[in-house]
């Protein structure tokens, strides 16, 4: 029996919009085990991005409790939150969000910069990760010189370099064509097989069906939370098995 | 702090919008440039003015007689009168604050045609009668011989000391004048020295370089001045206010000469101490003006930098948000913005400092060249415009402070950016 990496009970969140309070999350209970690969689905306005923000300690919740790796996450100052994010969580964004004036290697190395790792060490490690993702020869290229798929792979490398316990991906394939999307999903599945919990927010069914569990949100509540029968683990690829 | 990635960000922010960065930096550049040039010019003015009286006794004053302006004790107004030897004696004995007193004779009537003759050389020079004490008020060096001494006064010796120009005209270059005779208005005087004043810009009565000093007593007797004293200078004892002494002397002299006590015009005077004080206040005023204008401009420059930093923060909202999401602590973001702002102001300020110093240096060179070509006794009111190391260090500290100040608001704004903003899709 594996441990919970993310445990959420009775989570509420509302936003103040002028005089009206917009109640976005209305009591979410969620338990994600370490090493799971989960997708969160829902129409826009269902609260899936808000949930992801709270899980990523980018936003505070109002009520309820949230345990990340058995640590209770409460209102904390930004410095602590940043340290948590840096150590526990890797982010992947829809629009990649690479730093435009840093080359691929420097982008990947950035989280280590915030851990005060020396430039030489972090760039070496970044090269290693780029190599695994097959982008070694692009290490010195700027993001503007790369294709969407390449950019997302660099973003994945950046999320992995701090060796997080959880990868949070917000519509990771939203800006990619279906061919590239599946490639990215292959990579994410392989990442998952390393034992890293992967949580993907998406509204595409075929992306969701490549995860072990699908959580559907509707109007701030969990509508359905079901194991995905169609889930097929990919054969351990050659990307991370060398580890 | 010195990690390459940090500087990469700063340089990128500047490079991204070169023209904007240059315009912004120009404000700070101009402020420091102005401050340096104005301070240099102010110092030049002060140097120029004060170089003329390096060691003139600053605690001294001069007094002389004028026509009376009020009728008193049977005397009509407009009476001519003269200070005399008795007055000097009275002041010496009765007024305690006086350190040295030096009566002087001014031979207005002696300079005419060619009043000074030596062999075949003849020229017109001023003649004055002096006490040895005068050297304490207006110090001088003696390239040849000695100053007038007490024996000269006591024995009324027919000796004289001559100014530099007198020597140049009446003697060959390098010739020893001591022991030679000059015929001054028909009377022979032996030259005992050549004086060179340390304060060539202060001339009271006549241009010192073209003047011959005789012993006071000799001159009174030889040229029939009776017991007249044309004017006198004195110095105050240490810690005594010169004006206080002037106020003590006036009633004393007025009583002697039956001058109305309320007659303000009858005794003329020049208080070196208070004149210098006025001048010091003027210089202080100039300095305050320079700093007010300079710092005002610097603040304007800082506001410009601050403004642009705000724009940069806004432009980079997304980037900052991503950095926060992947683990940048608030301190890192603040440090980044502050470094950027300090970097911009310091570089711009240093260029201003360097350029300003260059301009001052060129001015100095031009002034030196002009001074070398000008006649020697021309008065200068501007010399050695310069700024010292203290100003440069003060400027550096100021720039860093200004940079921090300018970066503060943008940095606080950058920290308030929620990482969520970076997650939001466009």
Image (spheres, rainbow, N blue to C red):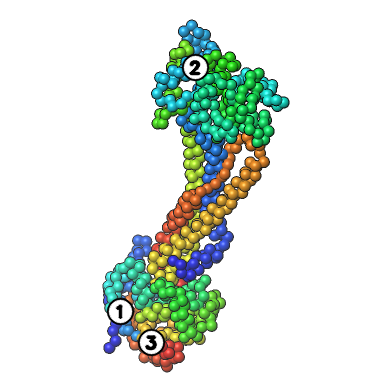
Seen from this angle, which residue lies furthest right? B120
Circles 2 and 3: CB atoms closer than 8 Å: no
Q: Which residue is mark 2?
A: B85
Is residue B106 visible to us here? Answer: no
- Residue at the spot 50% in from the left edge and 65% down from the top edge: B10
**Marks 2 and 1, Cα distance to the nearest angstrom?**
107 Å
Q: Position of residue B92 (x, y in %)?
A: 44, 21
Q: Residue at x 48, y 54 (%)?
A: B396
The vertical placement of B45 against A20, above or below, is: above
Q: In which chain is the residue bearing label 3?
A: A
Q: Position of residue B120 (x, y in %)?
A: 72, 26
Decide which of B8, A174 is in the foreground and name it: B8
Residue plotted at (64% across, 37% down): B376
Question: Which x, y percent locates residue B182?
Answer: 64, 24
Residue at the disc numbered 1: A69
Q: Nearer the viewer, residue A93 or B77?
A: B77
Q: CA distance from mark 2 to mark 3?
A: 115 Å
- Say left or right for A207 vs B176: left
* Both marks 2 and 3 on one chain: no
Task: Kindly identify which numbered label has been placed on residue B87.
Answer: none
Residue corresponding to mark 3: A194
- Indicate which label's residue lies in the foreground, 2 or 3: 2
Check if mark 2 and mark 1 are on a common chain: no
């Amino acid at each position: 029996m594996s441990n919970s990496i993310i445990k959420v009970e009775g989570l509420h969140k509302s936003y103040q919009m002028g005089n009206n309070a917009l109640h976005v999350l209305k009591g979410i209970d969620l338990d994600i085990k370490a090493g799971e690969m989960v997708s969160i689905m829902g129409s826009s306005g269902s609260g899936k991005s808000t949930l992801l923000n709270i899980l990523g300690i980018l936003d505070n919740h109002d009520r309820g409790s949230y345990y990340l790796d058995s640590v209770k996450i409460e209102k904390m100052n930004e410095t602590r939150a940043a340290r948590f994010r840096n150590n526990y969580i890797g982010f992947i964004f829809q629009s990649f969000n690479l730093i435009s004036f840093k080359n691929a290697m420097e982008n990947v190395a950035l989280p280590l910069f915030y851990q005060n790792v020396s430039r030489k060490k972090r760039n070496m490690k970044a090269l290693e990760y780029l190599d695994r993702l097959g982008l070694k020869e692009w290490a010195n290229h700027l993001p503007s010189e790369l294709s969407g798929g390449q950019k997302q792979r660099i973003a994945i490398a950046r999320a992995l370099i701090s060796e997080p316990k959880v990868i949070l991906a917000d519509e990771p394939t939203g800006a990619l064509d279906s061919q590239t999307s599946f490639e990215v999903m292959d990579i994410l599945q392989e990442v998952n097989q390393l034992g890293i919990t992967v949580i993907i927010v998406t509204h595409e069914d075929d992306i969701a069906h490549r995860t072990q569990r699908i959580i559907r949100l509707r109007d701030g509540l969990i509508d359905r939370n079901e194991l995905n029968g169609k889930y097929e683990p990919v054969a351990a690829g050659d990307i991370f098995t060398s580890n | 702090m010195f990690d390459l990635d940090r500087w990469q960000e700063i340089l990128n922010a500047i490079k991204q919008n070169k023209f904007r960065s240059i315009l912004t930096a120009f404000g700070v550049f101009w402020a420091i440039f102005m401050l340096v040039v104005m301070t240099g010019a102010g110092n030049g003015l002060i140097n120029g003015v004060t170089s003329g009286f390096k060691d003139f006794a600053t605690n001294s004053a001069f007094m002389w007689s004028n026509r009376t302006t009020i009728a008193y004790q049977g005397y009509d107004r407009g009476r001519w009168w003269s200070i005399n030897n008795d007055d000097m004696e009275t002041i010496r004995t009765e007024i305690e604050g006086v350190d040295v007193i030096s009566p002087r004779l001014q031979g207005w009537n002696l300079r005419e045609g060619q009043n000074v003759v030596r062999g075949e050389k003849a020229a017109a020079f001023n003649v004055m009668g002096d006490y040895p004490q005068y050297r304490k008020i207006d110090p001088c060096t003696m390239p040849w011989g000695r100053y007038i001494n007490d024996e000269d006064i006591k024995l009324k010796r027919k000796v004289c000391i001559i100014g530099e120009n007198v020597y140049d005209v009446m003697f060959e270059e390098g010739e020893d004048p001591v022991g030679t005779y000059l015929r001054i208005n028909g009377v022979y005087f032996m030259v005992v020295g050549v004086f060179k004043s340390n304060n060539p810009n202060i001339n009271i009565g006549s241009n010192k370089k073209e003047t011959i000093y005789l012993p006071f007593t000799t001159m009174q007797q030889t040229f029939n001045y009776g017991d007249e004293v044309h004017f006198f200078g004195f110095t105050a004892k240490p810690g005594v206010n010169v004006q206080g002494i002037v106020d003590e002397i006036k009633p004393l002299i007025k009583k002697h000469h039956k001058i109305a006590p309320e007659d303000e015009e009858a005794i003329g005077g020049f208080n070196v101490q208070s004149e210098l004080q006025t001048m010091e206040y003027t210089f202080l005023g100039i300095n305050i003006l320079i700093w007010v204008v300079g710092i005002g401009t610097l603040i304007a420059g800082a506001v410009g930098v601050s403004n642009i930093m705000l724009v940069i923060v806004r432009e980079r909202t997304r980037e900052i948000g991503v950095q926060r999401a992947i683990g940048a602590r608030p301190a890192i973001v603040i440090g980044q913005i502050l470094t950027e702002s300090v970097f911009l102001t310091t570089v711009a300020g240093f260029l201003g400092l360097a350029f300003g110093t260059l301009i001052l240096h060129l001015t100095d060179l031009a002034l030196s060249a002009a001074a070398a070509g000008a006649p020697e006794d021309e008065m200068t009111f501007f010399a050695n415009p310069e700024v010292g190391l203290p100003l440069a260090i003060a400027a550096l500290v100021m720039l860093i402070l200004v940079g921090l100040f300018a970066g503060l608001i943008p940095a606080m704004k950058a920290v308030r950016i929620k990482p969520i903003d970076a997650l939001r899709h466009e």
